[in-house]
Image (cartoon, coloured by chain):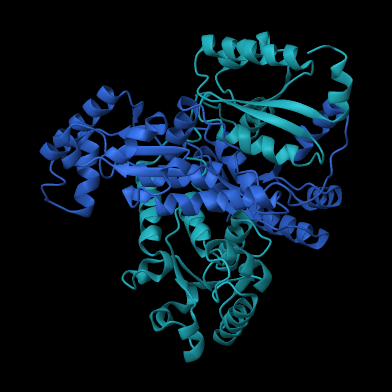
Chain colours: A cyan, B blue
Amino acid sequence: MTTEETPSQNSEHIRTVFFVSDATAITAETLANSVLAQFHGLKYSRYRMPFINTVDKAKEAALKINEVGKETGIRPLVFSTLVARELASTFNEYCNAFVIELFRSFVGPLERELGIPSDHSVGKSHEIGDQERYNRRIDAINYTLAHDDGQTNNGLDQADVILVGVSRSGKTPTSLYLAMQYGIKAANYPLIPEDFERGVLPPALEAHKNKVFGLSISPQRLSQIRNERRPDSKYASLENCQYETREAEQMMWREGIPFLSSTSKSIEEISATILLKLKIKADPHMGM
Amino acid sequence: MTTEETPSQNSEHIRTVFFVSDATAITAETLANSVLAQFHGLKYSRYRMPFINTVDKAKEAALKINEVGKETGIRPLVFSTLVARELASTFNEYCNAFVIELFRSFVGPLERELGIPSDHSVGKSHEIGDQERYNRRIDAINYTLAHDDGQTNNGLDQADVILVGVSRSGKTPTSLYLAMQYGIKAANYPLIPEDFERGVLPPALEAHKNKVFGLSISPQRLSQIRNERRPDSKYASLENCQYETREAEQMMWREGIPFLSSTSKSIEEISATILLKLKIKADPHMGM
């Protein structure tokens, strides 16, 4: 690339972003996404550099990043979660980039606040810390898979939450996210036309109403999603979607089931709302 | 609590930690987990405060945190991702805690580096940014569920990765994590005694060998996991687990399938390794 190209690239705000970590790089990536989301119009390509856990690898990573910087003519951005001092200092010594260091920014001040030294040990945040807690998380995933889409009424008493809603309102992805991220046993139950005719919740749920949470969705969006699966069916028609969502919402109002609309919400936003509303005190597992 | 109790609590390093956010609080929590994992022996209870998106709520959150500080006699820790200036400044004005602010630490320096102002707008990082990309993620989750445990050979050409391994080696949770977090279509296939007798991979996988990745596991751990499901069965016996894992590893060696042991690895670590080894350029979705 010639230097003449640099100004136009700059004006379009195209950057190369690297996530450098001694472990999975998940924290570095999450952090980077959050921070960079604040820059509207910034375009960037991302490169993951996980498991940089030796001095040699730290030097190699720095040199690779420098190469990209030379090729593009623009200083790369680096989000680093290198913990061990010798890894971080080697990396910084060689790397010509704009480096944001998570641990240097926060661990030092925390050491002073807590009055205890940090470990400076690699790979802590996403490894299996507590085996029992990790097992509970895997159990929650298995429970959620076995209790997807009303497959069984057995063991509903073990559920932390039971999601209800019409078919394709987002119950399955949300249940799996709750299980995966928070170790929550999340069953889910479809609300189907037979339930609307009877006018009451599926009988199996009556005893567990205090942990039932509803998902609704706009009929337009529902029809769009269903049409991808079964084009031009009655199931996917706007008229039927209007009927089902109206009936489902009325039933949830009648039964006093809290619900939200999933139409423009991500599974993260839906999950955070459910935890808040049901006052579930979930251990986050993202940090394991 | 009397002040006499404070020193002993302090010496045990018990703290109360709050995650304060104008949106899901997922970034604040991930960051906190990573940073606090560096303090071995630190015990803390966690409180999520998501959706603090008005000045009134920011003040209310600060006062609640102050109350806890008074009750426990120890200054609480706060990880905050409040973005909007008026929310952050109201919160800081009222809150008596040790506050770590993600955006203040990084967004300012980035503004200078990039030469563009940030948006300071709330809820960016986990909302549905790009609807098409979000749909691909949901599609990946559905694909992965439909292709769990060798349920079907249809559509294997669409898979980004196909995990293989003996029953209970961790294929399902890993596949779901890859789909959920990275929007990757991850099929998985069990390796069963019939495959070992035939001595070759399941025939459906032959055409897709370049995207097959194996999970192995120690026979002891496998036997332990299987015993929880089917106690005292032949399936769960150590002898059978030794046989299956040995045969599976030999087959993967013979077929040139890369594999790793899931025994002491979290699904995050397994997933990061798979992305690296198969050179999959996945968009992270954790930041949506």
Q: Can residue A159 be seen at all in this image of the molecule?
A: yes
- Taking A121 as reference, is A169 above or below it? below
Residue positioned 59% across, 68% down in the render: A277
**Number of callouts:** 0
- Taking A42 as reference, is B21 above or below it? below
Q: Quadrant of residue A235?
A: bottom right
Residue positioned 81% across, 41% down in the render: A40
| Closer to us: A100 or A200 | A200
Q: Position of residue B274 (x, y in %)?
A: 45, 31
Of the 4 image quadrants, the one containing the N terminus of chain A is: top right
Q: Can residue A281 be seen at all in this image of the molecule?
A: no
| Closer to us: B136 or A111 | B136
Q: Residue furthest front?
A: A232
Q: Is residue B92 left or right of residue A158?
A: right
Q: Quadrant of residue A39?
A: top right
Q: Is residue A183 left or right of residue A47?
A: left
Residue positioned 34% across, 42% down in the render: B170
| Closer to us: A36 or B41 | A36
Q: Position of residue B95 (x, y in %)?
A: 75, 50
Q: Is residue B131 left or right of residue A135?
A: right
Q: Position of residue A198 (x, y in %)?
A: 47, 91
Q: Position of residue B28 (x, y in %)?
A: 64, 44
Residue positioned 73% across, 52% down in the render: B123
